[in-house]
Amino acid sequence: MRRRPGIGGLQTAAAARVLKDQYRILGENVARLKTDLMKEQLATFRSQLEEFARKHKTAIRKNPNSTRCVLKLELASNTGFWAELFQIGDW
């Protein structure tokens, strides 16, 4: 018959649970920080892209390839920002 773990086994199991909880908390914090950083970078990218679009509006409207790219952006976005900015017809 196998003997049950003693006090040392119980202490080791408790320490392992505590360590597991600490790693879980650390992982959640890292994930939250990365998510916040990604949101910040995306907001910066969007504002820079909007500024570029406003600055080069006429050149983009004249070039068919550029207009096609803008239409692709419009399909990928959730808002009608690009259609509104370039006054491109609705789908």
Image (cartoon, rainbow, N blue to C red):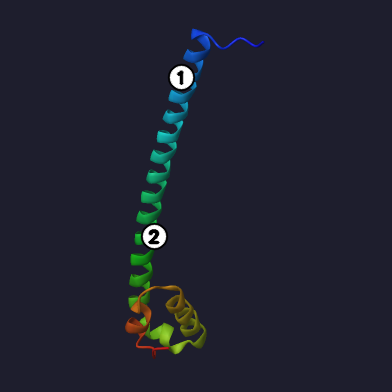
**Vertical arrangement, residue 48 with respect to residue 29, above or below:** below
The C terminus sits in image quarter: bottom left
| Percent of width and height locating residue 31 | 42, 44
| Percent of width and height locating residue 59 | 41, 84
- In this rendered view, identify the residue nearer to me: 13 or 67: 13
- In this rendered view, identify the residue nearer to me: 54 or 5: 5
- In this rendered view, identify the residue nearer to me: 10 or 4: 4
| Res. 23 image quadrant | top left
| Percent of width and height locating residue 81 | 34, 77
Query: Circle 2 — which element?
Result: helix
Q: Is residue 30 left or right of residue 51?
A: right
Query: Circle 1 — which element?
Result: helix
Q: Residue furthest front?
A: 1
**Vertical arrangement, residue 79 with respect to residue 62, above or below:** above
Q: Is residue 13 left or right of residue 58?
A: right
- The residue that disc 1 covers is 14
- In this rendered view, identify the residue nearer to me: 82 or 54: 82
**Vertical arrangement, residue 35 with respect to residue 3, above or below:** below
The residue shown at (35%, 60%) is 44
Q: Amino acid at mark 1?
A: Ala
The residue shown at (39%, 88%) is 88
Q: Residues within 10 Å of mark 2 (few under 14, many from 20)?
A: few
Disc on res. 42: 2
The N terminus sits in image quarter: top right
